[in-house]
Image: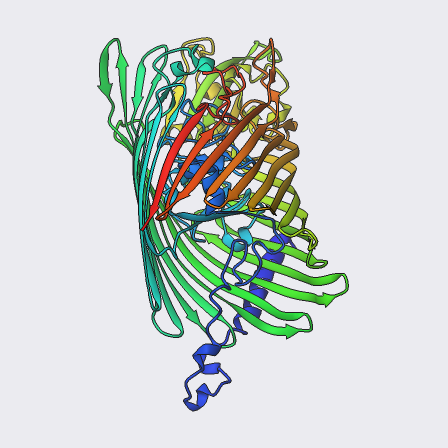
C-alpha cells in the first residue's frame, strides 16, 4: 500500500471512530429522551481546560509530545521590544532571512529577496524560508501579505499581546499548510479589566532614529461576559547608513538602514456566555502603516513609500455537549492590502511611478469537536475531529503596466482527526505514558490533495522527568506568484568549449509554473524535560530535531547565464534538454509568447547570429520555478529556566540556545549537496540568549546576553571570517504608588557594531544575522486606572 493511500485511510478511519463517538443532546443518557432537561453543570468544561498549541484536544499539555517554547507578557516586556518584529529578532530559532522589514537593501539568498514590497516581516523558524512557519493569532489563521504570502507580524500591536507559544515541530496534521519549520501562536489580551495607558520613547545613541509609541487599553467584565479594546500608535524615524561608522562607506547616498514608519493598530475582543451551553466570541483587528525609505544607486535616488492596511474578523461559537464533549464553530475573514509606490530622482528630476497593488483575502469556516471516547485502565482516550473550508484570493494590479493583472483564487477543504491514548498511568517508572496520533486531509482546487499524519509519544517517568518523541509530515502550498503563467523565453548564444562551434544556442524559460505541486517535509523530534522536585522552579528542556524538506519550489540554475557551460552540466540534467525536438522548441516558444516575454537576443556577448533564430535552439534550459530543491537540517534546542528566592529578592535565570548540527541543500535532484550553514545570509550554527532577572518589592531589573557564532563570507577574499557577535541588553523598572510603572530599557548596552561583511550596497553588515541599530535606549511609563 502506498504512503498516500495509507495516510488517507488513516485520516478517514480516525474520523469515523471519533465521529461515531460524538454525543448529541438527544443521545444523552441523563434522561433527555424522556423530555428531561440535561444537567448543565455536567456539560460545562472547566474554564482552565483550553485548547493550546499543537493539539485540537482540550487539556493536552502544550504540544504534548512536541516541543513548545512559551513567553508570557513579562518575558516579552523584558526584551525591551516595541514591536513583534523586534521581539522575534531576540528568539534564537528565528532567522532574519526572507521577508524582513529591517533588511532594506533586500540582501540575502532567499528566493523572495527583492519582492518584499510592503517591507513587512515574517517569522522564519529554522531559516527554512518565508512562508514555512505558520503564524496564528489566538489559534486561528489571519490574512497574509505581499507577493510571497506571509503573515506580517510587524502589524500586530505589542501592547495587545498576552503571550506567545512556539511549536518547534512540523504540524500540518493539526493545522494544514505552512507548518513546516513550526507554528507560532500569538495570543492577544482578553481578560484584562480596567484601563491602561502606556507611553514610550526610544532612540539610538548614535544616529537620528527616534521611536514613539502610545497605547490605550480598556477592558470590562460582567456576569457571563467581557470585552476589550486596545489601540496602539507607533512612529519610527529612519536610520541613515551615514549615521553608523560600519556603514559610512556605503556605495551611494542617501541610503537608509531602517525605514521610517507610522502605524496605527486596533484590536477588539469580546465574549458572551449565551446560556449554560453556548458561548459567543468575537474579535477584530485593524492596522494601517505607512513607510518611507531612501535608497540610492549609481543611476538615481529612489524613495519608497509602501502603504499596508489589514483587517481581520473572527466569530466563534462554543457548544458544551454531554459526556464532556465540546463543539467549536469558528469563522473568519481578513484582507491585506499593500500599495507599493516609488519616486525616482535622476539628474535632479523627480518622477513618481504609478503604484502596484497586491491584495490578499482569506475566508474560512472550521467545525471542531473534542472529548472523551472511552476509558482505558490508564485513563480516558480523548479525540478531536473536524472539518474546515477556506478560500484564499490574491489580486495583483500593476498600474505601471509592467505586469498583467493577476487575480487567482483557491478553495481548500479539509478533514482531520486526532487521538490521545493513555497507555500507562501511575506505574513505577511510568507516571504517564501516552500516544498521540493525528492526520489531516487537505484538498486544493488548484493543485490537488495531500494527506499528512503525525505520531507522538510522551513518557513522564515521574513528576520530575519526561521524554517525548514525534514524527510528522508537513506541506506548503505553492504561493500564487509562483503559479503565474508569466513565463519569459529568451534565446542566447552561449560559450561552450564542448560544442563544435564553441557556442550553443540555448533557449531559457523563466518565472512561474502553473503545474507546481506542494512542498513536503518530514520531521523527527526527540527530547526531554527535567523539573526536579528537589529544586523547585528549575526546568531544563532539550530537544533534537531533523527536517527533510523535499520538493521545494525554486529555480534549478542560479548562476550567470553565460557560465552555464563553463563546468559540467550534470547537475542540471533534470532541467536541461539537449537536441530538443521541433515540438519541444515550439512549446517553449509559445510559453514566452503567451506569457511574460519572448526575445531572441541580438546584442551583447551572448547575441544570436543573424542567420539563426529560436528554431536553431540546441538546448532548452527550463529555469521556471519547479518542485526540484531539497533541504535537510538537524539541530538541538535548549531552554533552561530557574527561579529562586534569595532573601527578599526573586531571582530568575534563563538560557535559550539553538545549535544546528548540519544543514544542506540541493537545487535539483542531480546537483551535489551544498552546505546551507555558517555563510553570509545563511543561518549560523549557534545562537544563544541568556539572562538574569531580579524582582525586589517595587523594583524589577534584568540583564541579557545575546550571542551569534562566527561564520564565513566567501566574497571577502582577504578575510573571509565573520566574527562572532555578542551584545548585552538590560532593563530596570519601578512600580510607583497608584499602579504606575516606569521602565528604562537599553538594547546593546556597549554599542557593539555588527560584524563586518562585504556586500554590494557597501553597508558593511549582514542584516539576516545582525541588526544595525547599535545602542538603543527607551523609557516607558504604564499607568493602570
Q: Percent position (x, y) of residue 660? A: 64, 34
Q: Residue at x 50, y 51 (%)?
A: 176
Q: Nearer the viewer, residue 294 or 177?
A: 294
Q: Is residue 396 visible?
A: no
Q: Is residue 548 above or below residue 439?
A: above
Q: Percent position (x, y) of residue 145? A: 37, 39
Q: Nearer the viewer, residue 549 or 273?
A: 273
Is 778 on the left-hand or right-hand side of 658? left
Q: Percent position (x, y) of residue 204? A: 40, 24
Spot the residue most to the front: 647
Q: Residue at x 59, y 64 (%)?
A: 419
Is 259 on the left-hand or right-hand side of 721? left
Is 667 on the left-hand or right-hand side of 293? right
Res 193 → quadrant: bottom left
Q: Is residue 432 visible?
A: yes
Which part of the image, by quadrant, shows the N terminus? bottom right
Q: Percent position (x, y) of residue 506? A: 50, 19
Q: Residue at x 41, y 89 (%)?
A: 35
Is 689 on the left-hand or right-hand side of 341? right
Q: Nearer the viewer, residue 461 or 736?
A: 736
Amino acid at each position: 500500500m502506498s504512503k498516500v493511500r495509507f495516510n488517507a485511510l488513516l485520516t478517514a478511519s480516525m474520523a469515523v471512530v471519533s465521529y461515531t463517538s460524538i454525543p448529541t443532546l438527544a443521545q444523552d443518557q441523563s434522561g433527555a429522551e424522556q423530555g428531561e432537561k440535561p444537567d448543565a453543570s455536567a456539560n460545562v468544561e472547566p474554564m482552565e481546560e483550553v485548547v493550546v498549541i499543537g493539539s485540537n484536544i482540550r487539556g493536552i499539555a502544550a504540544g504534548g509530545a512536541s516541543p513548545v517554547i512559551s513567553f508570557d507578557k513579562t518575558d516579552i516586556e523584558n526584551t525591551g521590544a516595541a514591536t513583534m518584529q523586534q521581539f522575534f529578532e531576540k528568539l534564537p530559532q528565528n532567522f532574519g532571512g526572507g521577508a524582513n522589514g529591517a533588511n532594506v537593501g533586500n540582501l540575502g539568498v532567499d528566493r523572495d529577496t527583492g519582492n518584499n514590497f510592503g517591507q513587512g516581516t515574517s517569522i522564519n523558524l529554522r531559516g527554512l524560508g518565508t512562508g514555512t512557519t505558520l503564524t496564528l493569532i489566538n489559534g486561528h489563521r489571519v490574512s497574509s501579505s505581499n507577493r510571497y504570502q506571509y503573515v506580517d507580524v510587524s502589524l500586530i500591536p505589542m501592547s495587545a499581546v498576552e503571550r506567545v507559544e512556539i511549536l518547534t515541530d512540523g504540524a500540518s496534521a493539526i493545522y494544514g499548510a505552512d507548518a513546516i519549520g513550526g507554528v507560532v501562536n500569538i495570543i492577544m489580551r482578553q481578560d484584562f479589566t480596567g484601563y491602561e495607558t502606556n507611553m514610550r520613547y526610544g532612540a539610538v545613541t548614535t544616529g537620528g532614529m527616534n521611536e514613539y509609541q502610545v497605547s490605550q487599553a480598556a477592558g470590562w467584565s460582567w456576569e457571563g461576559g467581557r470585552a476589550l479594546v486596545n489601540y496602539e500608535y507607533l512612529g519610527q524615524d529612519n536610520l541613515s547608513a551615514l549615521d553608523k561608522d560600519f556603514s559610512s562607506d556605503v556605495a551611494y547616498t542617501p541610503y537608509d538602514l531602517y525605514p521610517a514608519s507610522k502605524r496605527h493598530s486596533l484590536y477588539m475582543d469580546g465574549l458572551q456566555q449565551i446560556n449554560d451551553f453556548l458561548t459567543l466570541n468575537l474579535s477584530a483587528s485593524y492596522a494601517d502603516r505607512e513607510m518611507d525609505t531612501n535608497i540610492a544607486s549609481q543611476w538615481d535616488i529612489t524613495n519608497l513609500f509602501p502603504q499596508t492596511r489589514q483587517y481581520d474578523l473572527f466569530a466563534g461559537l462554543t457548544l458544551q455537549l454531554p459526556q464532556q464533549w465540546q463543539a467549536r464553530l469558528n469563522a473568519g475573514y481578513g484582507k491585506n492590502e499593500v500599495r507599493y509606490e516609488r519616486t525616482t530622482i535622476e539628474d535632479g528630476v523627480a518622477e513618481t511611478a504609478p503604484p502596484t497593488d497586491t491584495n490578499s483575502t482569506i475566508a474560512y469556516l472550521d467545525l471542531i469537536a473534542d472529548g472523551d471516547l472511552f476509558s482505558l485502565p490508564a485513563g480516558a482516550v480523548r479525540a478531536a475531529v473536524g472539518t474546515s473550508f477556506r478560500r484564499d484570493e490574491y489580486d495583483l494590479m500593476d498600474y505601471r503596466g509592467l505586469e498583467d493583472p493577476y487575480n487567482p483564487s483557491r478553495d481548500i477543504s479539509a478533514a482531520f482527526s486526532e487521538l490521545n491514548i493513555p497507555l500507562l498511568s501511575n506505574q513505577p517508572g511510568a507516571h504517564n505514558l501516552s500516544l498521540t496520533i493525528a492526520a489531516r486531509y487537505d484538498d486544493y482546487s488548484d493543485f490537488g490533495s495531500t494527506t499528512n499524519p503525525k505520531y507522538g509519544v510522551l513518557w513522564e517517568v515521574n513528576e520530575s522527568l519526561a521524554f517525548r518523541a514525534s514524527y510528522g509530515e508537513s506541506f506548503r502550498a505553492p504561493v500564487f506568484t509562483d503559479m503565474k503563467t508569466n513565463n519569459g523565453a529568451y534565446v542566447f548564444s552561449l560559450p561552450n568549449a564542448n560544442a563544435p562551434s564553441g557556442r550553443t544556442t540555448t533557449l531559457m524559460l523563466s518565472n512561474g509554473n502553473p503545474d507546481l505541486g506542494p512542498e513536503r517535509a518530514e520531521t523527527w523530534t526527540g527530547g526531554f524535560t527535567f523539573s526536579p522536585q528537589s529544586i523547585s522552579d528549575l526546568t531544563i528542556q532539550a530537544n533534537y530535531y531533523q527536517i527533510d524538506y523535499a520538493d521545494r519550489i525554486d529555480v534549478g540554475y542560479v548562476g550567470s547565464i553565460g557560465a552555464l557551460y563553463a563546468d559540467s552540466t550534470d547537475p542540471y540534467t533534470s532541467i536541461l534538454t539537449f537536441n530538443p525536438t521541433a515540438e519541444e522548441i515550439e512549446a517553449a516558444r509559445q510559453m514566452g509568447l503567451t506569457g511574460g516575454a519572448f526575445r531572441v537576443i541580438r546584442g551583447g556577448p551572448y547575441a544570436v547570429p543573424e542567420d539563426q533564430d529560436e528554431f536553431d535552439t540546441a538546448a532548452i534550459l527550463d529555469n521556471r520555478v519547479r518542485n526540484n530543491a531539497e533541504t535537510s537540517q538537524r539541530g538541538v534546542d535548549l531552554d533552561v529556566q530557574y527561579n529562586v528566592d534569595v532573601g527578599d529578592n526573586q531571582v530568575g535565570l534563563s538560557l535559550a540556545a539553538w545549535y544546528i548540527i548540519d544543514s544542506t541543500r540541493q537545487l535539483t535532484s542531480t546537483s551535489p549537496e551544498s552546505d546551507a550553514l555558517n555563510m553570509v545570509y545563511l543561518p549560523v550554527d549557534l545562537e544563544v540568549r541568556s539572562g538574569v532577572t531580579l524582582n525586589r518589592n517595587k523594583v524589577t531589573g534584568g540583564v541579557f546576553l545575546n550571542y551569534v557564532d562566527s561564520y564565513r563570507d566567501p566574497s571577502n577574499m582577504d578575510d573571509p571570517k565573520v566574527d562572532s557577535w555578542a551584545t548585552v541588553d538590560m532593563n530596570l523598572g519601578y512600580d510607583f504608588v497608584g499602579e504606575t510603572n516606569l521602565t528604562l530599557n537599553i538594547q546593546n548596552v556597549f554599542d557593539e557594531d555588527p560584524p563586518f561583511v562585504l556586500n554590494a550596497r557597501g553597508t558593511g553588515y549582514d542584516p539576516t544575522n545582525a541588526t544595525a541599530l547599535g545602542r538603543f535606549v527607551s523609557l516607558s511609563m504604564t499607568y493602570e486606572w
